[in-house]
Every structure is written in structure tokens, then in C-alpha cells.
Image (cartoon, helix red, strand yellow):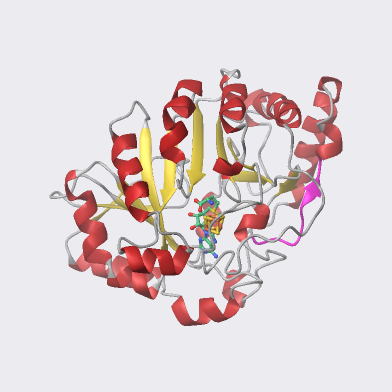
């Protein structure tokens, strides 16, 4: 196998993309994720900057080219800018992305961009202030929308909105579409996923992605062929809109066929499937630079455990309590 494809699993899926959770803490209380707010469940500290650096050194030699920082809420890390600068030191990484609720991003967005941030996903589940506050526990919708406008005028390569598809968000489809009529802003609707913590909410609010897809097709949106290795979103475009719509439908058949990502939790465990039962702790191999080869070999050897597909359609969501805990 060539050096660039060292990370290939037994189903010939290749991995160039890592989602790295840098904290499990969050200041929002999204009803599907942390309805009671963040509660500290473990005395262990999140990966330090130095541990992250050792992990990155191994990942780039395994062919990883894209890192997405996630959480919990990554903005709660005081050294977020330093983490981005550390990633930027590796020329093999051509995409440094951040998924955030953006509640105070306006204070440090310029610094993040100067440090090397290239892609930004901001989560917005409602465009109505009351609904937004109801879902997230935060009254910062206006500030967040202003930050999106600012980000669109910045040198970032891409700005996207992530919206969890709920019955209520579907009811707001018209508002979401108006937002992207003039702006070159993509919205990715993510099907609500069941976790250990959100079962009653899931039962009440889940809306199957095909209902949104049917509505878009009825409104003359057309499916766009996604570039190879572009991940699981099905994309839709419309000649009268500058922004595109993506639909991420984890309950659909074949969702896992094109899986192109690996995950590391904020405690340094490799998570091969979001909905698996296993996290493999590799933190002990991130303590100094001399461990790089051992860390690389451990990651390669663990890949054999990556399942062909998750079992969400059978209501089996693995040991995920909520996404904040493992990095969604
Ligand atoms: N706090 C950041 C944020 O909200 O963008 C980053 C972490 S959050 C876990 C990452 C993404 O996962 C967010 O877009 C969030 O809406 C989504 N998410 C969390 N729980 C989910 C669930 N049960 N089903 C679908 N998406 C979920
Ligand atoms: Fe926090 Fe993101 Fe979870 Fe909302 S989805 S509670 S912002 S981690």
C-alpha cells in the first residue's frame, strides 16, 4: 500500500480526514445533545496542546490532510488559536475546519483565520429567536447570524451552516431558503440521531430526511453530483439560489459506504464509528515525539475494527450518550 493510503480499511475505504474533539464541555443546552447542560463526568483533562501535536505528527505521516476541530464547544478551549497554529505547522494538512455554536466567535474569528483556519461550520437550528433559545438555551441568535455574515466576507475558503433536521426546523424551511438565496452559504440539514440521552426528544422531533428531500425536489432543487471523497452529504442546487443544500441522512441505506473520517475524542481515544461501542485509548502514545511510530502502527492496526456500517436503523446507537461526549 502506498504511503498516502496507509489508512485504508478492509472495505477499501480510505481515510484522509480526522475529526478531533478538543473538549467535551459546552455552554449550550441543545435539547438533542445536552438538555441539562454540561455536567463533568470524568476528572480526566482534555488532550493538551503537546499531546495534540504528537497526534498530528503521526496523522500527517499516515496521509491525513484534513482536520476538523469539534467538541463539545471548541471555543471553550482558551488555547484554540494555538491549536490551529499547531495544525498549520504541518504543510500536509490542507484544510483546517472548525464546527462551533459560534456564541463568541466574533471575538476571535480574525485570529483563528490568521492562525490558519480555512473552513467553518456554524450550527444554527432555528432562525426564530424564541425557537433558537428553546432548542439551545441561548439567546445569541442575532450575534451568531452577524458572525456568519462577517465570516462570509472573510478569507475563509468555506462557511456552512449545520442544522439538525427537526419537525420544527422543517417548518422553517422557507426562512432557511431565504437566507441562502443571495448568499453563497450552504446549509447542511443533519437527520436527528438517537443517542442514549435523547430518546424522548428523538421520538417527538425526528423527521426523516427523505421528507425534506421530496420537498426540495418539489421546489425544483436538483441533486448535484458530489466530488469524490466529499463525505456523506447529498447536495442540492437551485438556479435562483447562491447557496446549496446538503442533506446528511445517517439512517439511509448506504450512508456508511463512503465514510471518509476517523474520530479522536478529547481524551485521545480513536473512535472508528460514531455509533460503535468502542473507543480505543491511544493517549499513552501521545506523550513524546519518540512514540510516533508506535502511535502510527497502533492506528493502522486498529482500523481492522472499523465496522462496515452502523446499526442505527435497528435502534442500536452504540455507547453514545450524547455527541458532546465523543465529538459529533
Ligand atoms: N458545539 C459545536 C456545535 O454545536 O457545532 C460542535 C459539537 S456538536 C456535537 C457537532 C454537531 O453535531 C452540531 O452541528 C450538532 O448540531 C450536531 N449534533 C449533536 N447531537 C446531534 C444529534 N443527536 N443528531 C444530529 N446531530 C447532532
Ligand atoms: Fe453544545 Fe454543540 Fe451539543 Fe449544542 S450540539 S449542546 S452546542 S456540543
Q: Position of residue 47 (x, y in %)?
A: 74, 38
Q: Position of residue 209 (x, y in %)?
A: 39, 68
Q: How many marks?
A: 0
Q: Is residue 31 left or right of residue 318?
A: left
Q: Position of residue 50 (x, y in %)?
A: 75, 27
Residue 95 vs 173, above or below: the answer is: above
Split into 4 quadrants, where in the image is the N terminus? top right
Residue at the spot 23% in from the left edge and 56% down from the top edge: 222
In this view, the residue in front, 46 or 263, is 46
Q: Which of the 4 image quadrants contains residue 12?
A: top right
Q: Residue furthest left?
A: 240
Residue 241 vs 198, above or below: the answer is: above
Q: Is residue 156 left or right of residue 72?
A: left
Task: Reply yes or no: does residue 154 show up in magenta.
Answer: no
Residue 277 vs 305, above or below: the answer is: below
Q: Is residue 135 left or right of residue 38?
A: left
Residue at the spot 37% in from the left edge and 30% down from the top edge: 157
Q: Main secondary structure of the magenta part?
A: loop
In this view, the residue in front, 102 or 259, is 102
Is residue 13 visible in the rendered image? The answer is no
Magenta-drawn segment: 275-282
Residue at the spot 59% in from the left edge and 64% down from the top edge: 34
Q: Position of residue 237 (x, y in %)?
A: 24, 51
Is residue 17 visible in the rendered image? The answer is yes
Q: Is residue 102 left or right of residue 65?
A: left
Amino acid at each position: 500500500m502506498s504511503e498516502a493510503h496507509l489508512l485504508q480499511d478492509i472495505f477499501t475505504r480510505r481515510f484522509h480526514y480526522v475529526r478531533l474533539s478538543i473538549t467535551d464541555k459546552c455552554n449550550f443546552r441543545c435539547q438533542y445533545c445536552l438538555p441539562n447542560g454540561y455536567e463533568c463526568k470524568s476528572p480526566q483533562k482534555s488532550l493538551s496542546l503537546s499531546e495534540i501535536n504528537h497526534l498530528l505528527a503521526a496523522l500527517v505521516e499516515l496521509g491525513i490532510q484534513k482536520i476538523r476541530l469539534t467538541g463539545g464547544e471548541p471555543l471553550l478551549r482558551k488555547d484554540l488559536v494555538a491549536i490551529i497554529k499547531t495544525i498549520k505547522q504541518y504543510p500536509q494538512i490542507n484544510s483546517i475546519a472548525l464546527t462551533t455554536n459560534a456564541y463568541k466567535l466574533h471575538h476571535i474569528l480574525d485570529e483563528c483565520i490568521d492562525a490558519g483556519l480555512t473552513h467553518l461550520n456554524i450550527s444554527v437550528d432555528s432562525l426564530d429567536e424564541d425557537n433558537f433559545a428553546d432548542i439551545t438555551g441561548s439567546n445569541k441568535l442575532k450575534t451568531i447570524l452577524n458572525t456568519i455574515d462577517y465570516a462570509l466576507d472573510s478569507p475563509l475558503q468555506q462557511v456552512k451552516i449545520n442544522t439538525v433536521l427537526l419537525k420544527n426546523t422543517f417548518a422553517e424551511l422557507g426562512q432557511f431558503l431565504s437566507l441562502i438565496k443571495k448568499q453563497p452559504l450552504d446549509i447542511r440539514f443533519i437527520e436527528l440521531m438517537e443517542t442514549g440521552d435523547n430518546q424522548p426528544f428523538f421520538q417527538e422531533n425526528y423527521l426523516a430526511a427523505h421528507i425534506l428531500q421530496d420537498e426540495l425536489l418539489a421546489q425544483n432543487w436538483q441533486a448535484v453530483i458530489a466530488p469524490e471523497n466529499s463525505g456523506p452529504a447529498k447536495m442540492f442546487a437551485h438556479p435562483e439560489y447562491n447557496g446549496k443544500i446538503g442533506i446528511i441522512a445517517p439512517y439511509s441505506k448506504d450512508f456508511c459506504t463512503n465514510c471518509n473520517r476517523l474520530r479522536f475524542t478529547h481524551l485521545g481515544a480513536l473512535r472508528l464509528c460514531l455509533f460503535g461501542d468502542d473507543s480505543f485509548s491511544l493517549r499513552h502514545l501521545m506523550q513524546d515525539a519518540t512514540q510516533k511510530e508506535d502511535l502510527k502502527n497502533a492506528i493502522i492496526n486498529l482500523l481492522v475494527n472499523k465496522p462496515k456500517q452502523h446499526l442505527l436503523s435497528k435502534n442500536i446507537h452504540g455507547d453514545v450518550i450524547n455527541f458532546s461526549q465523543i465529538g459529533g
